[in-house]
Image: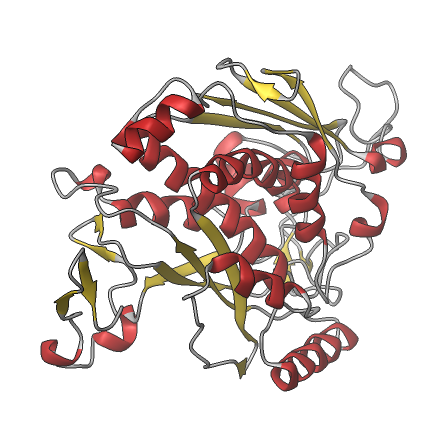
Amino acid sequence: MLTKLKYLTSGESHGKGLLGIINGMPAGLEIDEDYIQAQLSRRQKGHGRGKRMKIESDRAEIYSGVRLGKTIGAPIGLIIENMDYKNWVSIMPVDKSTKRIKNITLPRPGHADLAGVEKFGFSDIRNVIERSSARETAMRVAIGSICRKLLKEIKIEIGSRVIQIHDISDDSVVDLTKGAELVTLQADKSDVRCLDKTKSNNMIEKIDSAKKAGDSVGGKFEVFATGIPLGLGSYSQWFDRLQSKISESIMSINAIKGIEFGNGFENSSKRGSKVHDEIGWDGEKYTRYSNNAGGIEGGISNGEPIIFQAAMKPIPTLIKPLRSIDIISKEEKLAHKERTDSCAVPAASIIAESMLCIVIADSVLEKFGGDSILELKNHINS
């Protein structure tokens, strides 16, 4: 449902690498590989990540669309090399191979494995595993970093924090008066990106306990944006509504099973008088006495910070696998084991930030327009 920006990713988890392209970025935006690298590094961190993150450097090479440190209005191409590919050449060759490769035939419950082989007619689940893997989200973070830089130019900040892992919750209300980045920097100091130190330690214990048991845990994270102008999105069509665009992007992240804006689910059990954000006037602009709507009303940003929470299920690849059925023999066996994390909620929050960056950047360009950063700023100022 993006209108001004278009992007694609390509690549397999254990293939040569990841490719990405984004089209529609205005000319004149300063961007470099180090800026993108900073966000990719954030995605790799978090207590509960597996050994893969120690292998990959996840550095995105800007392949096209940038000259002398600035975008030139052309499609921007990115490449992330998979450092681990050297260990998978015999399993993931591009050309035909004479070497016998053992097929994976035991689908993992909770993964795309069974639905994928049934849909495409594969006899080897490896074809599904490679593309459905969350490895692909590294490129989305790289693309989102370019959009984040555009938003930074117009003083819009995006951030996140983890609010729950397994049954440990941080119910504190985040203070966004000084911007989203300050809160995010605080969250990044925690290995699980939780603002409460005691809860952080408890979350780490839950992750360690699950890992020891050969299991995994999920959780929730909160994403927020400050500096959002009033009027992004529209109520005129279902696909124009800002929360629809955000929801589509967030729900596309691996293992995300739910999203709510503001106090969405909690508000369902309250009376309207306790839910809707009353309107004030400070002499220059409209204000709100609360932000239960999460910054969006009728599909349009209302000038308040955008806030939403997303729920992530436990990772379905388990060290101690669940029961499954062999797709060839139909025998009951334990599911396939693949290298895995025991918890990826902190990483998912970073990916969600990047997805929000893409949606907000697209919505800003849709509302204000501009073929260059200078022109965009002039339009916003006017």
Say which quarter of the image contains residue 97: top right
Q: Compared to 183, does 208 lie above or below? A: below
For this rendering, which residue is in front, 8 or 100?
8
Which image quarter is the C terminus in? top left
Say which quarter of the image contains residue 122: top right
Considering every residue shown, the one lying at the far front of the view is: 283
User: What residue is shown at x 41% (from left), y 54% (from top)?
Assistant: 225
In this rendering, the count of numbered labels is: 0
Residue 316's spot in the image, x, y percent? 61, 60
User: What residue is shown at x 48% (from left), y 34% (from top)?
Assistant: 150
For this rendering, which residue is in front, 25 or 345?
25
Viewer can see residue 169: yes
Say which quarter of the image contains residue 9: top right
On screen, residue 214 versus residue 376, left or right, reads right
Residue 328's spot in the image, x, y percent? 65, 42
Please name the colour scheme applied to the rendered image.
secondary structure
For this rendering, which residue is in front, 349 or 36?
36
Residue 127's spot in the image, x, y percent? 65, 33
Residue 339's spot in the image, x, y percent? 77, 53
On screen, residue 199 versus residue 379, left or right, reads right
Which image quarter is the N terminus in? top left
User: What residue is shown at x 72% (from left), y 67% (from top)?
Assistant: 47
Viewer can see residue 110: no
